Amino acid sequence: MPDSQITLLTRDGARIEVPCASGDTVLDAAAGAGYHLPAMCHQGTCGLCHARVTSGSYEMSGYTESLLPGRDLGDVLLCRCTPEGNVTVQLPCREDQIPRHQIPLRDAVVERIEMVWERAVCLSLRLQPHDELGVAADFAPGQYMELAIPGTGIRRAYSLANLPNWDGLIEFLIRIQPGGQFSAWLTGQARVGDTLTVRGPAGRFVLDEASPRPRCFVGGGCGLAPILSMLRHLAEFQDSQPVHLIFGANQEAELLPESEIAALRAGLPQLTLTLAVMNPGPAWNGFVGTAAAALDASLAPGVTEPDIYVCGPPKMLLAVEEVAARHGLAGRVIAERL
Ligand SMILES: Cc1cc2nc3c(=O)[nH]c(=O)nc-3n(C[C@H](O)[C@H](O)[C@H](O)COP(=O)(O)OP(=O)(O)OC[C@H]3O[C@@H](n4cnc5c(N)ncnc54)[C@H](O)[C@@H]3O)c2cc1C
Ligand code: FES
């Protein structure tokens, strides 16, 4: 007999019942029932397994508190969340986005490491042939992969920045974090020809291609990579729906370069762009403030309500969710937290 019952609710209204033994986390109970929810560290430090408990009591312990600015709203990390009775959990994904099997590991070889702009490195890898998966890079724009530093158990999640292809090429845009372990490997030891273990694709931050609404993308820093992949996909398919990109940075130097903006505009002539800078220099004449404030300003009465895709750190996501809720668009936010 299970000690309690977990009800998993998905964005598309599915209801999944999962038995939970005493002391199990929601993540383990779901995996035990064959639902492999996104997770990486299993230690409350990467933030990948976030969700919201909407009813029931639970215990949360041993996690990085900055990952959960919405703790008062029921936000949890499923790998650290132990039910104390029956609970209901709202997942930020559709039912068909929950893998029913473990995603296998595979090898990939480093082809390019290039500093592309301020503190941002483009890392290109070539997937090696795999018995089940073949060689193609098959993913939905917006998804991520886990990359392991060779010879260590250290893994980090990075969003795919390029488009799916038959040649097995996967590209990442990685912002260098001073003192960070993957960052140190990438800028210090990594060489063309190195082999890495990778796992993926995974993740539920993907385009709702059936939606007839305009699309608004909100990103900052390393949150640009999945958005770039989505925008490149829309350009490839000559999508004609209105697109607004809001990109937030602390300083002008962290904004995406002119060459990237020109490439995006060439593929998506309908693109409108807002660059939001928190602490600009005296010459800046664009928007001053956060990406969430820029979104707020763009959602004026009379504007057709968009789907809002946001990717960035937890605080930025919470701020965007608050703005969306104030404009009656809470259900329109599709979010990826880094
Ligand atoms: C789904 C997902 C997708 C992502 N996509 C991208 C992407 O496309 N591009 C991207 O750049 N990033 C992305 N990230 C973030 C990425 O996974 C890493 O978290 C990031 O690159 C930092 O990794 P690191 O190993 O370099 O730093 P870490 O070693 O994890 O350290 C991070 C920071 O914490 C500091 N730190 C570490 N340990 C301590 C300590 N004990 N005390 C104090 N400070 C400490 C470090 O100095 C560093 O500044 C994504 C994350 C997720 C969850
Ligand atoms: S899997 Fe990393 S926080 Fe839960």
Image (cartoon, grey):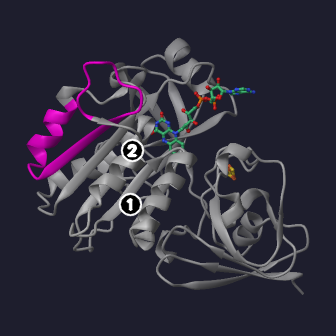
Q: Secondary structure at mark 1?
A: loop
- Relative side of 260 to 72, left or right: left
The answer to whether residue 263 is magenta is yes
Q: Are marks 1 and 2 in contact (CB under 8 Å)?
A: no
Q: Residue at x 15, y 63 (%)?
A: 241
Q: Secondary structure at mark 2?
A: helix
What is the three-letter code of the residue carrying label 2? Ala
- The vertical placement of 32 against 284, above or below, is below
Q: Position of residue 275 (x, y in %)?
A: 28, 37
Q: Which mark is residue 263?
A: none
- Relative side of 86 to 233, left or right: right
Q: Residue at x 70, y 71 (%)?
A: 30
What is the three-letter code of the residue carrying label 1? Val
- The vertical placement of 27 against 39, above or below, is below
Q: Nearer the viewer, residue 111 or 259?
A: 259
Residue range corresponding to the magenta coloring? 260-286
Please state the quadrant of the image where ligand 1 appears. top right
- Quarter that holds the C terminus: top right
Badge 2 is on which residue?
291
Tally the numbered discs: 2
Residue 125, picture quadrant: top left
Rounded to the nearest angstrom, the CA distance separating label 1 from label 2 is 20 Å
- Quarter that holds the N terminus: bottom right
Q: Nearer the viewer, residue 137 or 80?
A: 80
Q: Residues within 10 Å of mark 1 (few under 14, many from 20)?
A: many
Badge 1 is on which residue?
206
Whether residue 165 is visible, yes or no, is no
